[in-house]
Amino acid sequence: MALIVQKYGGTSVGTVERIQAVADKVKRFREQGDDVVVVVSAMSGETNRLIGLAKEMQDQPAPREMDVLVSTGEQVTIALLCMALNERSCPARSYTGTQVRILTDDAHTKARIQDIDDENIRADLKAGRVVVVAGFQGVDDNGNITTLGRGGSDTTAVALAAALKADECQIYTDVDGVYTTDPRVVEGARRLDEITFEEMLEMASLGSKVLQIRAVEFAGKYDVPLRVLHSFQEGPGTLITIEDENTVERPVISGIAFNRDEAKLTVLGVPDIPGVASKILGPVSDANIEVDMILQNIAEDNTTDFTFTVHRNDYDRALSILERVSSELKAREVQGDNKIAKVSIVGVGMRSHAGVATKMFGALAGEGINIQLISTSEIKISVVIAEKYLELAVRSLHSAFELDEAEVVQES
Ligand code: ADP
Ligand code: ASP
Ligand code: MG
């Protein structure tokens, strides 16, 4: 008998029929004798619909009210799933984040879980009930409803699994595991049997939304056995694992991530004097805008160009800040581009292989794709390119690094 935490995403609970199918599935686990805690997302499209309603009221609604609004999506699903379970003579009880007491900080719309009270859940499990918890939400010290950021139900599930010391945390979704790249973009993408926490963390933070990044962080920190599986198809899915030093042969690259969420800004002709970077980036961070990649060129004629990327939603604000700063700094010009994309190759195998970057840049050059920015870390290389080349770039890298389905060589 095992204790399992299962999470079903939006598409998997997107209709009444699917919620019923989830109930059938949960019941089968109960019949095998497992204790089951289920975390559900809002029905697919619901969170976006709620955000749309908010936008009709106000341009920038108060984050506290946003959380009160968007947390309702998950509340609908927990109740419906419990009804479906009870209808199947499988006793179940639903909990909102507040009712469990998933305590978070007060950073509305991107709160972090601090503590989980597992008393009610344990009592229900002991009484033979399935516990169904609303994903994506918690409560702060003052009783305000908070939410955990888009995709946050993954994090709810992993945090519950950690708190309950569950035997496994199963993330059920609309694909049958973690793939070498988004299977909806590259047809030849291949499901991975395993991926390390480190690689999954990079993939998630570089744009693969199959798991929320905080869920992966949590799982790594608390040693939660984590698996991604298809909700309605049988299969082993993908296990997120700790890197095994003994694996002799591993692929150099495990996956390719990409995202279209960034925009690029450049200040041209900045005087090359100490303090310039902080004069440019200070006001940007004061406005709560996160900066991702940064590039400063070597000075020519005592002036330099300074480029960085921000989230696309922050592009307009960042641009107007830069226009102000650049006149103060007596820079020549500010340029911006919000039609860019970031493509990253990820793999722990990179540590022991030379020439990975050369191969990546060669593959892109072969397609005539210009690289605008590069950034690297121990297990990833990212490039910024024009958005229109994104799919071409991902496909060509996927085959250059022999990740395509047909090209897999059996690992020893
Ligand atoms: P859920 O609603 O179940 O949380 P998401 O839409 O958040 O599902 O995440 C699943 C989606 O993630 C898939 O449909 C797929 O398009 C996308 N995805 C992106 N990168 C990958 C990847 N490397 N492997 C698998 N899926 C990926
Ligand atoms: N419903 C939330 C979202 O759409 C949380 C989740 O599905 O994980 O982002
Ligand atoms: Mg998700």
Image: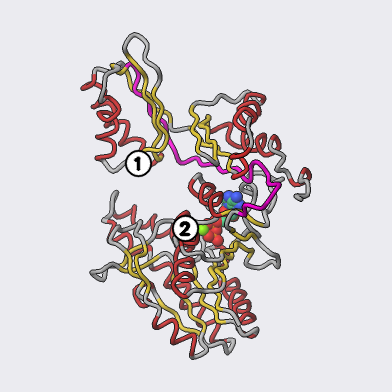
Most foreground residue, 209 or 82: 209
Most foreground residue, 79 or 33: 33
Identify the amino acid type marked 2: Gly
| Residue with the most extreme top position | 301
Q: Position of residue 301 (x, y in %)?
A: 34, 8
Residue at (62, 46) in percent of width and height: 181
Residue at (50, 32) in percent of width and height: 384
Q: Is residue 332 magenta?
A: no
- Image quarter where the N terminus lies is bottom right
Residue at (63, 32) in percent of width and height: 354
Most foreground residue, 311 or 37: 37
Q: Secondary structure at mark 2?
A: loop
Ligand 1 image position (quadrant)? bottom right
Q: Secondary structure at mark 1?
A: loop
Tell me, what colour scheme is on the image?
A: secondary structure
Which residue in the structure is indicated by mark 1?
A: 290
Looking at the image, residue 245 lies above or below residue 339: below
Query: In the image, is the residue at mark 2 within 8 Å of ligand 3 by its beta carbon?
Result: yes
Which residue in the structure is indicated by mark 2?
A: 151
* 36 left or right of 116 in image: right
Q: Which numbered disc, 2 or 1, marks the residue closer to the eye?
A: 1
Most foreground residue, 20 or 408: 408
Looking at the image, residue 319 lies above or below residue 211: above
Residue 46 can be seen in this image: no
Query: In the image, is the residue at mark 1 within 8 Å of ligand 2 by its beta carbon?
Result: no
Identify the amino acid type marked 1: Glu
Span of residues in magenta: 244-269
